[in-house]
Amino acid sequence: MPPYQLLSPPANRRYRLIDGTLQPHPQLDGLYESLEAALQEAISWMGDRAAGQPLTIGVEVSTTSGNWRTVRFPQALC
């Protein structure tokens, strides 16, 4: 008899960027493989924009139940 598996295998998590109102970001609406990839996309996008008002961006991660959990609340990126 095989041993019991107490922990389920890691879920395939996805990340998405959110705006200052905690909603999916309207321009950066993709899904990302990692927190770092999501933030890099946001930094790159912000670098392409003209300097002006600071933009706040946060990140959410998918849960095994199909919901989203905030892992980085919206704040200005450097």
Image (tube, grey):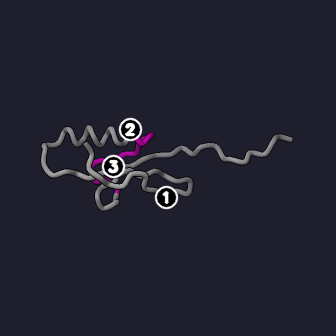
- Mark drawn on residue 29: 3
The Cα–Cα distance between marks 2 and 1, rounded to whole angstroms, is 20 Å
Residue placed furthest toward the bottom: 21
Q: Is residue 77 left or right of residue 61?
A: left
Residues 45 and 76: in front is 76
Residues 71 and 68: in front is 71
Q: Which residue is mark 1?
A: 67
Q: Tell me, yes or no, whether the two marked residues, 3 and 2, touch with CB atoms within 8 Å.
A: no
Q: Which residue is mark 2?
A: 37
Kind of residue sitting beneath label 2: Ala
Quarter location, residue 46: top left
Which secondary structure lies at badge 3? loop
Residue 6: x percent and y percent?
72, 48
Q: Tell me, yes or no, whether the two marked residues, 3 and 1, touch with CB atoms within 8 Å.
A: no
Residue in the picture at 66% in, 47% down: 8
For the magenta stretch, what is the residue range?
Answer: 24-37
Residue in the picture at 32% in, 54% down: 74
Viewer-nearest of labels 2 and 1?
A: 2
Counting residues from the start of the chain, the first of labels 3 and 1 encountered is: 3
- Indicate the quadrant containing the C terminus: top left, top right, bottom left or bottom right: top left
Prevailing secondary structure class for the magenta stretch in the rendered image: loop
Q: How many marks?
A: 3
